[in-house]
Structures are given as C-alpha cells and as structure tokens.
Image (cartoon, rainbow, N blue to C red):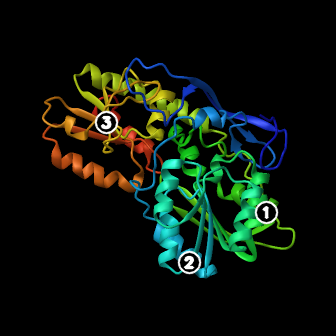
Amino acid sequence: MSDHCRLCHSTDLRPVIDLGEMPIAHRLLRSKSEPEERFPFEVLACGSCGLPQIVKPIDPDILYRQFNYNFSSWKPEPHQVDELDTIGKFTKHHSVFEIGCNDGLFMDKLRERGAKVLVGVEPNPVSGKIARERGIKVYSDMISPAMCQDAVAQAGKFDLVVSRQVLEHIVDFENFFACVKLALSDEGLLFIDVPDFAPGSTAGDLSVLWEEHVSYFTEATLLALLARHGFEAVSVKKYNFSGGSLAVAARLAGREVKAPAASTGVGEKFAERAREYGARLRPVLAKARDAGMQVAIYGAGCRACTFTNAHQLADLIEVSVDDQKERQGLFLPGTRIPIRSPEELLDQPETLVCLLAVNQENEIKVSNRLREALKRQLHIVSIFAPSDIWHELDQFERAAGYRNG
C-alpha cells in the first residue's frame, strides 16, 4: 500500500470518486443468501501526471482466490486482426513472449503469421492449461525477473513482447518494465493494449471502474509511462472494444524520451456526471416498475456488477439475463439480482425495460435478437460508454412519460 502515484511517484493524489464498500465483481454468488466480502473502492488521480488509480487495491491473494475460469474464448475481439496487422508492420516476430497470455489465442494467431517460438506467462491455471494444449510454453506464476532470465536462457531474447489487457492490473510498474527489458531484444517491439478510460470518464459511466483495474489509462498517461521507462511509441491506435481500448507499439529508444504533456484533470467531473446519471435513472426505473413494467439488465459481467451496485439498483432490477450458461442460476454480487437465460424474457405480457449491459460492439446484435424474439412492448436502453448513454436516458425518460420534449 502506498500514498505515492505508481507512475511518477508524486504524492499529489486527488480524489476522483469513492464508491464506498463494494463486492468483488467477478465473484458471482451461488445463492441469494451466500455471505460475501466487501472492500473500499476509491479512485484517486495524480495531480502531476494525471493517472487515475486505486492506491490501496485489494490484496491479490483475496481478489483472485476464486479466480478459476477462462475469459477470451467467448469474448469477440473485432479489433484483433488490426492489432496483428499493426505488429506485422514493425516486426517479423519470430519469437514472442506474452505477459498474461490467457488461453494463448493471440499467440496462436501470431503463430499463423510466422511466429516460431511462443512463451507465455499466465497465473490462471484454467487459461494456462488451454494455452499449453495449443503448444505454447507457459509459466504459471506472476511475472518476475528470475522467470524472464529463465525464458531468455532457454529461448534467447524475444523479437516481440506482448501484454494485452494486463497492465491495468499491475501494481508494480518498475518490476513490469524491468521484466520487459530482460525479455526483449534490443531492436524488439513491445505491444501493449489497455482499456481506454477517456470515453467512460467523459460520460460519467461508472461501469468502467473495476477493482481488478488498479490504473485507468488515457493515451497521454500510457505514453508517459512508456517514456518514463525508455520506450517510444511507433504506433498508437484506439478501438471500440469492451468500452474502449488503447493499443501502443513501442521500442526502446536508447535515449531519454520526452513524455507528452500531463493530462491532469482527467476524470475531474467524473463523479459529478456519474451521480447525476444515477439520480435520473433511479426514479424513471421506479416509475416503470410502479406502472407494472418488468425491468431487466442484459449482461452479468463485471461492468454490470459495478453499474448495479454503484447506482443502488438492487430493488429496481428484477432479473439479469446472460448468454453464458455458466452464469445462469447464479446471482450478481452485492445486489443479488438473479441471473437467468434470455429465454426467460419470452412470453410474458408486461412491457419490458431492458438495460443493455453489453459492450457497444455487441449492442446491435443483442438488440435485434430481443426485438425479433419478444412479442411484448420493449424499451432497450444502452447504459455503457462509448454509446451515448445520456441520449439513451433522455429517450427512455420520454418513452416512460417521465419527461416531456
């Protein structure tokens, strides 16, 4: 635990938002009465470099104690091909070292494009097992200098080091970049992909917060972090993936790299916007319930957990529906909203209000499926940025007769 910024080590940390005591978002409940732990959830931002961060994260031994499933096999990645194309422009990537390789899917795609030596780091045993079955050598632990030295001793320095959707989980940036430098060849390429905090923070979308994500990057703060550790970007791209994603390809510069201007003030109005959104959403949902409508949320992921808990929607949402069979029959953490199959929304007479808790790249598909399947009146409301959640709320308020105009 530290009172210093993990990027620039400044002590000028300023409040962004405090959600109070929150449950662990990925820990779905087996029953409505199952006891659960709650932990403080406060985000601060550095006044010097601008990085929003959870300064006092949950102990990893607690946070990942029941972390026993694999994620990427079910989650579409429409930006993956462009990321692979970008990497191919800057390196032949004969040898690849991936920090947080998950089930090895991305390295498998790199192998299809010519990679011969594939080494991954993945502490999740379920995901790591799948990666090994793909013929990838996997270290089953957290990244460390000793591990990287062992990997280099066996395979030599790597042409490409990849870390996708991992850096936001990392508390110790110094250790991370020390490991990268041990593994990467002098002319090698580092490819990092992280969630983009900018769209959600601008909209006041609380679903972008997740206790596993201890740092919330914008383009400026990610480039500043890379510059601090001697890396210069050769490509920066943004994707509409999972609420917004930043991907940077970089090389060791061999000289001091000038960081971009600090993006201080990011998230400054985040809490205010988020509170205003919740203050408008709750009454219109209550009015819909009073009018006999059913209120459901489509999606039972971690963003839905943060959204329903932070906006205090336990008594306003009757059910969550989710396409993943593994989640059906369980309950959302905190709110204890039951998770059911989407088929349970069929053949009911009352009007349905469906809060769409899916990533924007999947919204049209899910919306069309609902409209085709349901024979009752339906209000669909997108609640996650980068969709225009305020316009969606305006439309819902008018449709429910809560506002004029």
Under circle 2, the secondary element is loop
Residues under labels 2 and 3: Cα distance?
39 Å
In the image, is 342 to the left or to the right of 150?
A: left
Q: Which residue is mark 3?
A: 328
Mark 2 residue crowding within 10 angstroms, few (<14) / some (14–19) / many (20+):
some
- From the viewer's perspective, is 117 left or right of 9? left
Q: Quadrant of the C terminus?
A: top left
Which circle's residue, 1 or 2, is located before the other in the chain?
Answer: 2
Horizontal side of residue 65 vs 361, given as left or right: right
Q: Disc 2 or disc 3, which is closer to the eye? A: 2
Determine whether label 3 and label 1 are within 8 Å by CB: no
217 or 136: which is nearer to us? Answer: 136
Q: CA distance from mark 3 to mark 1?
A: 45 Å
Secondary structure beneath dot 3 equals loop
Circle nearer the N terminus (3, 1): 1
Q: Amino acid at mark 1?
A: Ala
- Residue 251: x, y in percent? 73, 72
Element type where label 1 sits in the image:
helix
User: Which residue has dot 2 on it?
Assistant: 115
